[in-house]
Image (tube, grey):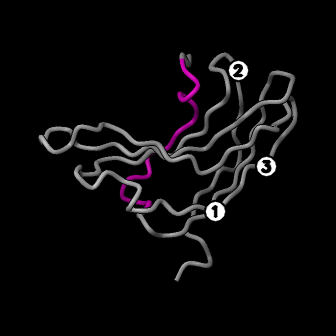
């Protein structure tokens, strides 16, 4: 079971997601509890800390946030984002990217359906 809010559904996208390229995503979330909740989609960047110049293990980039997700009904999550290379730690080597969905409380169960992440049709 989950023991923290960030331990939601996730997918490794390292080697698939490129910095400075626009992406779109869409999916549906269903929180089993009743009430109104905040839900976030985040990209976690992981760095190689074996070099002296790199003192940061991870950085987090929120790409979607909604504070009005009503529990016990399907909610559409969608958005566009670009993971800017300038937002990554230049003193470190990037070794991982993880896209994940998190709920406001690790005790809340939720379901994700039809989640897709793809290059934006507006990218050149």
Classify residue 111 by image quadrant.
Answer: top right
Q: Is residue 30 left or right of residue 8?
A: right
Q: Is residue 27 left or right of residue 17?
A: right
- As measured in the structure, the alpha-carbon distance from the residue carrying label 2 to the one carrying label 3 is 18 Å
Q: Nearer the viewer, residue 30 or 37?
A: 37
Question: Which label's residue is closer to the chain start, 2 or 3?
Answer: 3
- Quadrant location, the N terminus: top right
60 to 121, vertically: above or below: above
Q: Is residue 115 left or right of residue 90?
A: right
Tell me the SS state at disc 3.
Answer: strand
Q: Residue at x 36, y 39 (%)?
A: 58
Q: Nearer the viewer, residue 101 or 115?
A: 101
Question: Which label's residue is closer to the chain start, 1 or 2?
Answer: 1
Which of the two discs, 1 and 2, sits closer to the camera? 1
Q: Is residue 45 left or right of residue 101?
A: left
- As measured in the structure, the alpha-carbon distance from the residue carrying label 1 to the one carrying label 2 is 26 Å
94 to 60, vertically: above or below: below
Please name the residue that numbered disc 3 is placed on: 76
Q: Residue at x 87, y 35 (%)?
A: 73
The part of the chain drawn in magenta is 4-17
Q: Residue at x 61, y 44 (%)?
A: 41
Q: Is residue 119 magenta?
A: no
Where is residue 44? Give x, y as percent: 44, 43
Tag on residue 80?
1
| Magenta portion: prevailing SS class | loop
Please name the residue that numbered disc 2 is placed on: 108
């Amino acid at each position: 079971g989950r023991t923290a809010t960030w331990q939601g559904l996730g997918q490794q996208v390292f080697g698939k997601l490129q910095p400075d390229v626009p992406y779109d995503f869409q999916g549906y979330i269903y929180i089993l509890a009743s009430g109104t909740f905040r839900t976030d989609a985040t990209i976690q960047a992981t760095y190689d800390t074996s070099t002296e110049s790199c003192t940061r293990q991870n950085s987090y980039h929120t790409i979607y946030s909604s504070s009005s997700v009503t529990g016990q009904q399907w909610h559409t999550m969608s958005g566009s984002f670009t993971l800017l290379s300038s937002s990554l730690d230049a003193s470190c080597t990037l070794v991982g990217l993880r896209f994940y969905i998190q709920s406001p409380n690790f005790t809340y169960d939720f379901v994700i359906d039809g989640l897709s992440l793809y290059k934006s049709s507006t990218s050149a």
